[in-house]
Image (spheres, rainbow, N blue to C red):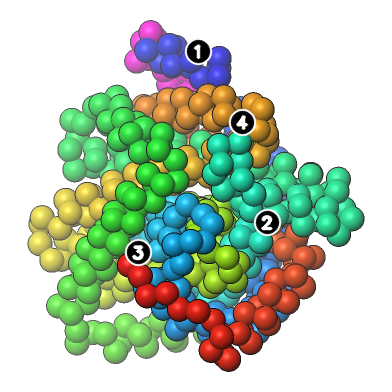
Amino acid sequence: MRFLFSLFFILLSSSPLAQPDFQSQVNEVFGMLNGTYAKFLFWPIPIIQLPLVLFVMVTGGIFFTFRYGFINVRLFRHAIDVLKGDYDNPEDEGEISHFQALTSALSATVGLGNIAGVAVAIGIGGPGAVFWIWIVAFFGMCLKFSSCTFAQLYRIKDSRGEMLGGPMVYLSEGLKRKGFTKAGKLFGGFFAMMTIFASFGGGNLFQANQTFEIIKSQFPGANPWVVGVTLAFLAGVVLVGGIKRIADVTSKLVPAMCGFFVLSCLAIIVSNISEVPAMFASIISGAFNADAAYGGFLGVMIQGVRRASFSNEAGVGSAAIAHSAAKTDEPVREGVVAMIGPVIDTHVVCTMTALAILITGAHNDPALAGKGVEITSAAFASLGSFMPYLLLLAVCIFAYSTVISWSYYGERAVEYLFGQKLGHNAIRIYRLMYVFIIILGPVLSVTHVVEFSDLMLLSMAFPNIIGMIYMSSEVRGHVTDYLDRYKSGKMPVYVTKN
């Protein structure tokens, strides 16, 4: 805390020439940490040359898809019915509805990764990268199902009477039940620490920094302090209300902005409808070309993951924290709802971005090589010169929604680490730090700090996936029971509004 306030006053009092020196020192320190840790996290698996952390995430998705009998296909229609509110029982314990839990989780994933990360993936892997985006998201559905079901199974009430759940809780308690108490504490504590670091960086600093950069691209005279303070104020107003306030905002914000973005992309596609068959042909043919396929994996799983925080965050476990607060007495049901997240985030939003880029050929512009949001902006410009400004609005709102949702994830991690006696005061300190970093985000240019937070986010996947694999028989039993009751028609239906 003292370090953050010292940093704030240094930036305020130092001259413009001194600030870059301070930033370069911060970057240098984190650069050394990144270089050491990234060697382990991205160690290439022999023969397949897939980075270690991505190998764990991909194989984890495949494992759970088969382990739960392709539940992402078998209960997909049922998931839609649950989202409609057909199974919402207002008497169930929890704080928010199924729909609100999903939008809260989506608000943390739908953002810059869907707009900029996809463009980078296509730039590296070509049209074939889109196919691999679909495949990874398909298996990612069961990863998210598993973590959110576990979150409901092991959720507890904190000192304020609010639901506390997520990987830090179910890893600790689940492994304890199996006789691995120390391992459970280690896994849960490690996950919570990584969550806090990731919230400060990828969920906060990066979002605020990139929001300003995007605004500056359209309005060169924009002031970074004004942008930072405005974003911090808007976030602070919401995050002090906890998950209920966040859910109220995101349940309206996320559908509206996703709808606007998808409709804009569809307008681009329809205006170039004659090129659609050739576009899909290039996606399929490019996906099964050896070089392009591997390039697609690199684009999606390396560039896309590191820069977009793995877009839908399947396997990371962050969404389970939000879904643990949902009102339900059926853990599997919340897992079924959660698996819709990758569909919306990746199969819909990311795909629309990709198709808009490919059909306009924006990724082929040499002047935009290596760019992210600029490529998407160029695609939107094909509808008119005003569209990049609407895209700017969408990007800012997406970034804002990510900021408020990640604040909740960080809070829950703080609550877990400090317990009931110190948790309340610790959360207050965390919120102050979080809002403070939002203000600094547009001012700082600390690339290595953001890279460090990306590494922290990816690190969350290790204990989460490994722990879930070991405990998967428990969820498997609940899945069998749920399917039997659902197919037999013994499951009560409540037709209510969200």
Q: CA distance from mark 3 to mark 2?
A: 25 Å
| CA distance for labels 4 and 1 | 25 Å
Measuring from the top left, give residue 280's x and y in whole percent: 35, 85
The amino acid type, in three-letter code, at marker 2 is Tyr
Tag 4's secondary structure? helix
Q: Are marks 4 and 1 in contact (CB under 8 Å)?
A: no
| Residue at disc 1, secondary structure | helix
Residue placed most toward the observer, 347 or 49 = 347
Which is in the foreground here, disc 3 or disc 1? 3
* Amino acid at pointer 1: Ser
Viewer-nearest of discs 4 and 1:
4
Quarter of the image with the N terminus is top right
Residue 481 placement (x, y as % from top left)? 67, 81
Name the residue beneath numbered marker 4: 423
- Disc 4 marks a residue whose amino acid type is Gly
> Type of residue at label 3?
Asn
- Residue for point 76% across, 50% down: 172
Q: In terms of secondary structure, where does tag 3 sit?
A: loop
Callouts 3 and 2 close, C-beta under 8 Å: no
Residue under label 3 = 498
Q: Are marks 3 and 1 in contact (CB under 8 Å)?
A: no
Q: Which mark is residue 6?
A: 1
Q: With 372 as the anchor, is 361 left or right in this view?
A: left
Could you tell which of marks 3 and 1 lies nearer the N-terminus? 1
